[in-house]
């Protein structure tokens, strides 16, 4: 699921008590930040606040987050130089759906509920292809015209 132009989840919807993988290709990634952290919490009062260091990959920064029972998932990003991407001071806030038993599969042996299905690999690959196309469209014209310059650390 693409929530905004530069934020992707590995699932179609956010459901309580599940793990999600979030990918970030926003301003901090585009500015070649070495380290990016996701700062997140739940509900209107930002409960269970945590900072998690995201893993830098060719496709952006990625992290795995455990969603808890709450109405919303709130987050923003910061780099090691304390530069923030907080959606122009609005933060990124998205609803969390309640888990329903009709979507669950029960194990007949001991009655336990099995975890929800993982996404098909083809869906995940389609997201990677979309991200690669976005990067080519964004950066290739700049590289060809010579207007693309990397920041040099001084």
Image (cartoon, helix red, strand yellow):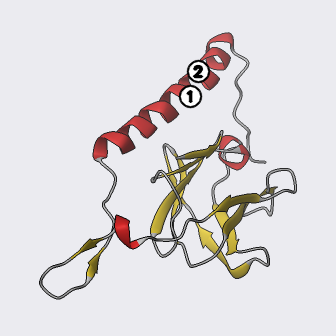
Q: Nearer the viewer, residue 150 or 121?
A: 121
Question: Which mark is on residue 137?
Answer: 2
Q: How many marks?
A: 2
Alpha carbon separation for disc pair 2 and 1: 5 Å
Vertical relation: 89 (above or below) 153: below
The image position of residue 26, as x and y in percent, is 68, 45
Please report the residue visible at 80 percent of the width from the left and 63 percent of the height from the top: 82
Q: Quadrant of residue 106?
A: bottom left
| 145 with respect to 116 (left or right) | right
Question: Which mark is on residue 134?
Answer: 1
Please report the residue visible at 51 percent of the width from the left and 55 percent of the height from the top: 13
Element marked by disc 1: helix
* In the image, farthest residue toward the top: 145
The image position of residue 12, as x and y in percent, is 47, 50
Vertical relation: 127 (above or below) 71: above
| 97 with respect to 51 (left or right) | left
Q: Nearer the viewer, residue 2 or 76?
A: 2
* In the image, farthest residue toward the bottom: 110
Vertical relation: 97 (above or below) 141: below
Please report the residue visible at 33 percent of the width from the left and 66 percent of the height from the top: 116
Q: Quadrant of residue 104?
A: bottom left
Dots 2, 1 in contact, CB < 8 A:
yes
Please report the residue visible at 52 percent of the width from the left and 72 percent of the height from the top: 16
Vertical relation: 138 (above or below) 75: above
Element marked by disc 2: helix
* In the image, farthest residue toward the right: 89
């Amino acid at each position: 699921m693409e929530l905004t132009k530069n934020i992707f989840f590995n699932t179609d919807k956010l459901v309580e008590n599940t793990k999600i993988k979030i990918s970030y290709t926003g301003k901090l990634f585009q500015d070649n930040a070495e380290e990016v952290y996701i700062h997140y919490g739940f509900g209107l009062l930002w409960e269970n606040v945590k900072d998690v260091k995201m893993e830098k990959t060719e496709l952006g920064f990625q992290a795995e987050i455990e969603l808890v029972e709450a109405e919303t998932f709130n987050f923003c990003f910061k780099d090691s130089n304390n530069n923030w991407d907080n959606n122009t001071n609005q933060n990124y806030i998205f609803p969390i759906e309640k888990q329903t038993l009709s979507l669950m599969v029960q194990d007949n042996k001991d009655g336990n509920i099995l975890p929800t299905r993982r996404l098909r690999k083809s869906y995940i690959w389609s997201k990677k292809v979309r991200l690669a196309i976005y990067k080519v469209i964004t950066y290739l014209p700049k590289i060809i015209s010579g207007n693309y310059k990397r920041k040099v650390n001084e």
